[in-house]
Amino acid sequence: MLALRAICLQSLLRVAWIFQSSVLSTGAEHSIQDAEGDLLFLMDGSGSILPYEFTRLKEFVVDLLTPFTIGASDVQVGFLHISDDPVVEFPFNKYMSDTAVQWALLNMKQKLGDTNTGKALSHAKDTMFTQKAGARPDVPKVLVWLTDGVSSDDISQPIQLLKELGVTIFVVSTGRGNYIELKAAASEPSESHLYYVDPDDMYVITEELRNEILEIIQVKKLRALDITASSFRLVWPKLLSSDTDYYLIEYTPLVESQRKSWKTVTVDETSVVLRQLFPETTYEVKLTPIHDNNYNKPLVIKVTTLQDETSPQIIVISESRPRSFHVSWAPTPHSVVSYEVVYGVLPGGEPSLLTIDGNQNTTVVNNLEPNTTYLVTVSALYQSGRTKALSAKACTQDVNSKVKDLKFIDIGPTSVTASWDPARGRVLQYRVRCTRQQRSPSVRTVPAQVRNVLLTDLIPGTDNRICVKAVYRNGTGRGLCRTARTPQRRDSLSLETQSTKSFCIQDHRCW
């Protein structure tokens, strides 16, 4: 096989152009997560590169990187331009996400100038592959040189120094230049490290070059994803193939090594969720591939679960009044820094905010509108920066909700008729409570248009406390109470009228 990947038959490539979309998508269908390395692109941005070619080279780099996971624990990318003097577009520690790298690549400008490749290669060794630029000491290092094959200065010495540093060098030439010189620059074997291609046809080599890079930076690595306070998901590359093989997973809290847990996973699985873990706890996890009942070298990782972020789980609205109500919530874990209580009129009212210390779980909301429904949202702000929220409806009372002029008529030894004037507002119904001596209280409800009720089963010659209150859509009004004394069966009708007394407590004890 020739070391040269020359794209010679232009007519054939024009026909193949219709397959470009499918070729590009092949390598990007699945995200590559088991790779770790520092990947530096050295691109000719001098005046010998046409603007059209420069654009094609940028797009090629974006396509090449699309499946890789970019980050401090995965693949890091740096970019260096060849010009009169080398120009750093960005070092390894500049962009830590896939989208950030792609944005930077697509928006960079051509530098023009002379093609001083030797200077740029020396700069790559002395400046880019250093800790200051974000390069990591114990990961593979790869340099991809994109060139038209022309260099104004010597490249042999800096190339040799880079190789001695342990850098693997790939050369992609757009079809011009000294083949002997480029072959010597590429790492061995040159058959898999040197590519010649026309700028319009670079997609042809994208997947092959990506796979060659992956051979260098792919690692057998155990990863932890979706970490919560009580669980995380383990992911690993496929390490076994036989149907009788399996994986043994052991996970142990570092502070309690005697609490070791384990589980087995079939050969077809490369992911598992570990549950029922302790919050804010570091676990040592070992995944051991078992082949033919023999233990292979385990993959090991330490994972720390998050803080217990379980608040709020319940909101209680109490002590509702015309212009205020009380808001309480639970639980209150120590990891909460503060709570935010947001409240606004339903529907679509302007929200207001109260900030409450993380040690408290209650507050009073004031300056509200009477007879109004509010949406209340309590948000917990945790030390980790995460938030969790829960909402509930709350209703204020009607300011004019008191029943007026409670009267008793037709009082007999065992019954009495209570009558009253209507309360203000949109009353749904009235609730009448009769507290009788020597017998349990009774409660009656009547429609809003009915304003009297016959109470029976009373004891002759006893005091009976009768209270009436209006029921509204958002709660109950203030109660009005009086005492009626039933006569003895042979006595004349009597009525002991006490002074009218009204009071208002919360709904569940509003009598």
Image: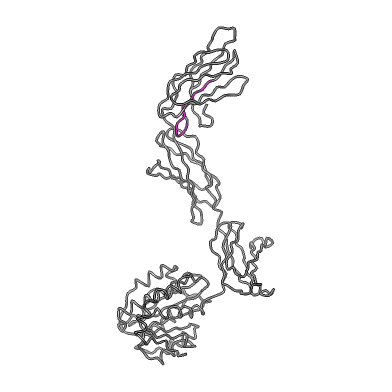
Q: Quadrant of residue 118?
A: bottom left
Q: In which quarter of the image is residue 490?
A: top right
**How far across and down, in percent of the image, does residue 178 sit?**
38, 91
Look at the picture and state if 489 lies above or below 338: above
Look at the picture and state if 143 lies above or below 101: below
**How far across and down, in percent of the image, does residue 210 sit?**
46, 78
Q: Is the magenta stretch mostly helix, strand or loop?
A: strand
Q: Nearer the viewer, residue 496 or 96?
A: 496
- Say which residue appears at 49% left-offset and 18% top-offset: 418
Look at the picture and state if 482 lies above or below 296: above
Does the segment drawn in magenta span residue 29?
A: no
> Is residue 495 shown left or right of residue 250?
left
Look at the picture and state if 275 lies above or below 329: below
- Say which residue appears at 50% left-offset and 77% top-offset: 214
**How far across and down, in percent of the image, does residue 183 sit?**
43, 90
Q: Quadrant of residue 375?
A: top left
Coloring applied to the structure: one colour
> Is residue 357 shown left or right of residue 148?
right
Total numbered labels: 0
- Say which residue appears at 32% left-offset and 74% top-offset: 109
Q: What's the magenta region?
A: 466-475
Q: Which of 239 and 45 is in front in this view?
A: 239
Does the segment drawn in magenta span residue 470?
A: yes
**How far across and down, in percent of the image, does residue 253 sit?**
64, 61
